[in-house]
Image (cartoon, helix red, strand yellow):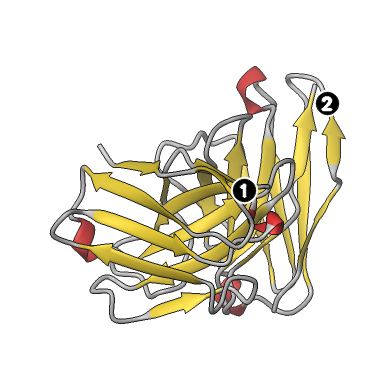
Amino acid sequence: EIVLTQSPATLSLSPGERATLSCGASQNISSNYLAWYQQKPGLAPRLLIFDASSRATDIPGRFTGSGSGTDFTLTISRLEPEDFAVYHCQQYGSSPLTFGGGTKVEI
Amino acid sequence: QVQLVESGGGVVQPGRSLTVSCAASGFTFSRYGMHWVRQAPGKGLAWVAVISRDGSNKYYGDSVKGRFTISRDNTMNTLYLQMNSLRAEDTAVYYCARIPLGSGTFDYFDNWGQGTLVTVSS
C-alpha cells in the first residue's frame, strides 16, 4: 500500500499570499496518478487536480499541481477567502487507493 | 447536473448491520464505476470499496473486507453498501463517489455525494 504524507498539517496564511502544499509518497506513483481535493467543513470533497497537474473543470487558474514520482505539490498562487479549507491528496496508481492525512489552510 | 444523494445512515449498535444507499441522477449511471469512501470524525478520507460499471467486479479495503458488500442496481440508478458486524471504528461519514467515464476500476473521483453519517455505538 502506498502511504501518502501531507505537509504541513496546518498552513496559516493571509488572503493574497501564496500557499504551497506537499504530498509525499512512500513509493513511486505509477503514471503520476495523483489527485488533489478541496474540502470545506460539512461538505464533500471537490476535485481540483488529477494526473498530478491537470486542472478539473471550472477550477480557477490559481490552483496548480506539479510533481512526479514520489513528490507532489499543490500551489495556490494568491489565496482567496474561499480557498481556506482542507486539502487532500489521493493516489490511484495502485490498489488500494490511498489518501494523505490532509493539510488545513487557515487564515 | 450530476447528483449523488446518500441515505440510510444512523446510529447502530456494535455487531449489527446497516445498509446505506446512493441515488444517482443527471448522468447515465450504468456507464460509471462507483466507490464508497469514508471519513471518521475529524480524520482524513479512507477508501472503502469499488464496483465496476456492470457490477461484475468488486474490491474492498482491508479494514472492511468480509464484512461490507458493495452492490448496485442500474435499473434504479442506485449504489448500495451493506455493512455487517459493525464496529466502533466504522463510525464515519460515508460518501459515494463517481470515477470518470471510460476509466478503469481505480481512478480519481470526479463527483461526490454529500455523505451520510453512520455512528456505531451502544
Name the element at disc 2. loop
- Read off the chain for label 1: B
Pick the residue in front: B12 or A55. B12
Residue at the far left in the pictured view: B75
Pick the residue in front: B69 or A12. B69
Q: Rate crowding at label 1 as few (under 14), some (14 to 19) or many (20 or more) other CA atoms within 10 Å.
A: many
Would you place residue B101 above or below residue B118 in this image? below
At horizontal 74% and vertical 41% (from top left) the residue drawn is B42
Is residue A18 visible in this depiction of the protein?
Answer: no
In the picture, measured across the screen, residue B75 lies left or right of residue A14, that is left
At horizontal 43% and vertical 52% (from top left) the residue drawn is B96
Q: Quadrant of residue B69?
A: bottom left
For mark 1, what is the residue? Answer: B92
For mark 2, what is the residue? Answer: A13
At horizontal 40% and vertical 78% (from top left) the residue drawn is B58
Query: Which dot marks residue B30?
Result: none
Q: Are marks 1 and 2 in contact (CB under 8 Å)?
A: no
Q: Amino acid at mark 2?
A: Leu
Q: Amino acid at mark 1?
A: Ala
Q: Real-space Cα distance between discs 1 and 2?
A: 30 Å
Q: Nearer the viewer, mark 1 or mark 2?
A: 1
| Image quarter of the N terminus of chain B | top left
- Read off the chain for label 2: A
Q: Rate crowding at label 2 as few (under 14), some (14 to 19) or many (20 or more) other CA atoms within 10 Å.
A: some
Name the element at disc 1. strand
The x and y percentages for residue A50 are 51, 57
At horizontal 70% and vertical 74% (from top left) the residue drawn is A69
Badge 1 and badge 2 in a common chain: no
The x and y percentages for residue A94 are 58, 79
Q: Quadrant of residue B63?
A: bottom right
In the picture, measured across the screen, residue B35 lies left or right of residue A94, that is left
Is residue B67 visible in this depiction of the protein?
Answer: yes
